[in-house]
Amino acid sequence: MKKFLSLVLALVMTMSLVTVSAGAKDFSDDGSITYKEAVDVISGIGVVDGYSGGDFKPTEVLTRGAAAKIICNLILGPTTASYLSADTAPFKDVPVTNVFAGYITYCSQQGIINGYADGTFRPTATLSGNAFMKMLLGALGYDSAIEGYTGANWTVAVIKQAAGIGLDDGNDEFVGSKAVTREEAALYAFNMLQATMVEYDAKTSVDINGATVTIAGDKAKEVAQGSYDNNMHKPNLQFAERYFDKLDKTETTDDFARPATKWTFKGDKIGTYADAADVTYTSNVKLGDIYSDLDMSEKDKNAEVYYNGVEADDVAVSKGNTVKVSSSSANNKLVADGSTVEVFYDEDNNDVTICIIDTYVGTISSKEEKVSDPYVVVNSESLVTEKDASTPVSISGSKARFETNTDNFEEDDVVLFTYSQSADEIKSVVKAESVEGTLDKYTLGKNLTLADTEYKYSKNIAFSFGSETSMTTKSDYVIYLDTNGMVIYVDEQEFDASQYAYVLYTQSSNSRFGKDQVQLVMSDGSVKTVDTDDDYTSLEGTIVYYRADDKGEYALRQAANVHKNGSIVTTEDDRTYPISTNGVLRNGATDFDMKNTRAAITTKTGTTVYGNSETVFVVAESDARGKTDYSVYKGIKNAPTIMSDDPTTSPTVETKAVEMVYTTSGSSDVVTFAFIDATGAYVTNGKRDVVFLAAESATKMITDGDNNQYYLYNAVVDDEITTVKVKAAQDAGSVVLAGNDTVNQVVTNADYNNKGLLTSADAISTSDYTTLTGTGVWKLSGSYSIGLGGTTASASVRYTVASDAKMYYIDTDGVITKIDDVKNISSDSTATYIGLLDVTDGDIAYLFIQEVDNGKQEGAGNSGVVLSGISASYSSGTVTVTLTGTNAGQVYPVTISLVNGGTLVKLTTANVTGAATTTTATISAALSAGSTYMVTCGDQSFVLGV
């Protein structure tokens, strides 16, 4: 008797334990294989293979040719079958060169398969379940003529016989007319291995009026065991015992104490596979209900109970018993919603075995692929306990490893896993399904409603932010579900700084506002006064997540995990608390210390948090007139150093309290978004956005309909490839050369007007970066190394590239392409470069590589100049240039440019008439002492220090 609860079929199929060893193949699509035991055994003995890509493709349909190969592999064994060939074409559409010709010929000769009346076999056509069953029956010894597998109603006879001997066991939805899939073929072949072979009494064939008639016994009889080993442990001779005598099947229990089957082949273990439970539950259940569901007629007063493979308290499974499997009297707290309770019933001995298996949630912390048995490392987010439901079990070290195809997982994936306490190891790992949405409500310890759908809590639920009580309604979350659709993990939606803002004022604190308005400092540093859908007085002075509807009305939700470094309030801007001296916030900490040379931030005495490359800082500074400037920085290395105490004075003098309101990632101390008022404090300039302008992309001057005049450039703004409109008339002090189409420019602190035009920018600060320029880019050994300059790799200067460096190729048309890995950079002796070397850690943070056509130096026009070398010297207003590799009479344009931060500023170009081999010329140019210049000609350049 087998009874199944359809509600939990998915759970049983997905999380059922399979212990796989050397004999079984680990396919990349294991998770999508329904008949895992069958596929493992059939592939383990070599009857069915996977594909070269490592997958099995279980749902692909089987062709007639592939079916013939399976039959031959079963009867002859894979090695012998591989040598089959055809001397002549077995069918008119199967030439001897067909990959399946040998298999088809053999099966045809043995009477296992037939072709069509038109003389074809159609090897690439799909095969129906009925046709494949007919092949398997033939291999077992059943005679088509005797059994009636011919004629118009052959399928009826085939299905009756196949079902009668269990060839379709395991597929309750078998439809013989449908094309059989690869995993269905594996299942039916697996069942055939365990099916008993048949034979007939002596038979003869006679010719009666031109028709061949078989005269024999009218009934197949089972073949006796004979001298074959009884490896299948059934009466008489099974197919596997004759053709795969090294395949052994043993009844055992698995690591969860469930009845199971262990398969081995040639002494190697293929795997251990749990039997299907007679009944399965996903919550605590009354013992009387188990009695009824099993159709028991006699109680089992000492039914054994196992928790994660370890024996727990026996219980009495009896009629009408209202006590549950887990109660205060036995197995207390071992079963709850989300637990799997599998019940196995041995009717012959009236023995009930109850196996409780918990599902836990974790994340993939790492994976190891370059070992003989690849594995993932699981970081458990759930509390795993022993059978007393209180003693914690540490899942760490080797116990956290799970051998699997690592292609199925990525680091930080949220996964479901099972753990056997008896084996002390993780037994299964699958990726968890997730749902995103806004939290409507939640009931402590029971359920939550997300996007209008209610989800029950699973027993081992965990929260990435530490506590359920930290959740806030109307905020967005990602929930992960166990295989029963219950919530097992709750995480905040991935942080998106662009949707966060600081609430500076609300209607209660500023009479200028209407009833429902707030003033926000946005994540881009802008300040907006917006209409809101509610009164948000309570959110003043905190960080919020916002959404705007199509009418421009804002809905605000307090961000999760907001912290302050004092009793911070918004400055009133009156005589007592003017913004000009206090800034927009007050009541912060007077021992604030944040340096962009380290990750740690001291927000106040005793509190340290950490910034990383993704942390967004909005820094406010108010001047003596009460005007406040908001600057935005991404990454702690790019943020300014901010200190309450001025380190430049001796002794250091306290200047002003610094206010910091910030959010953290979950329960960690890593800052995701920070609003800092640094008015009056010691502040150094942070590393603002780096802007690269590709010279070759510059357009002619554009005049738009509003008479704005600008040049359009392909550009990189911080780490985004985009286009930038550069105003033709730059503001005073700007280092940008508007319209320059010969030299690439790298600048910072770019300002834009309300028309979106870049109006000014500063040179790269030497306190932040050392600017590297020159010709020659070289690929060197080492994961993060590159050579710059020189005519060969050995002559270049080796630099370390930061792991998060921003790198780009620029082609000769000014088209920019991002370089994802330093390994993707090719050596190029003619390419020019601009690199920004971080003065803090000495690594290259930005690298721009300009590709140059053969014979065309960037900005050299179409002169077709090719040189083997260039050098230069300076003395008293004269630059002496030596060109190597010149041709007599050819004109060589030589350009002298000032290296200004990341920008080359062209000073002059002189045409030099070449001599044979080497040419020396002088060029008048007033160069400044202490400056660096670049002398370029054709495909060569020389850095000249004065």
Image (cartoon, rainbow, N blue to C red):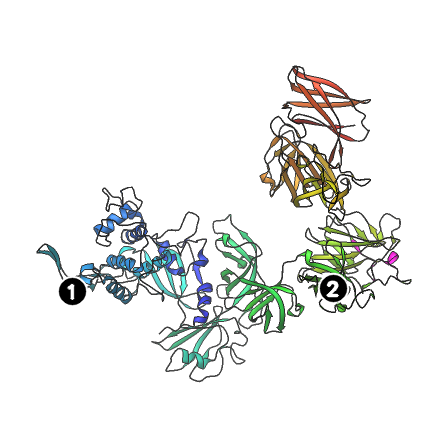
Residue reaching furthest right? 575
The label nearer to you, 2 versus 1, is 2
Q: Is residue 584 magenta?
A: yes
Residue of label 2? 531
Check disc 2: other Cα within 10 Å, few if <14, some if 14-19, many if 20+. Answer: some
Res 112 seen here:
yes
720 and 806: which is toward the camera: 720
Quadrant in the picture for residue 474: bottom right
Q: How many marks?
A: 2
Residue 218 is tagged as 1
69 to the left or right of 32: left
Q: Secondary structure at mark 1?
A: loop
Q: In which quadrant will I find the C terminus?
A: top right
Amino acid type, residue under disc 1 in the picture: Asp
Residue at 79% x, 31% y is 931
Location of residue 295 in the rendering, given as x and y in whole percent from the top left corner:
38, 79
Question: Is residue 837 covered in magenta?
Answer: no
Choose between 712 and 4: the one closer to the eye.
712
Instruction: Say which amino acid is labelled 2.
Output: Asp
Q: Nearer the viewer, residue 582 or 823?
A: 582
Q: Can you say which quadrant of the picture contains the N terminus?
A: bottom left
Q: Position of residue 702 (x, y in %)?
A: 71, 39
Q: Which residues are magenta?
A: 577-593
Q: Taking 774 as reference, is 800 above or below it?
A: below
Name above or below for residue 901 compared with residue 412. above
Other-residue count near label 1 (Cα within 10 Å), few / some / many at <14 / 14–19 / ≥20: few
Given residues 378 and 796, the one toward you in this image is 796
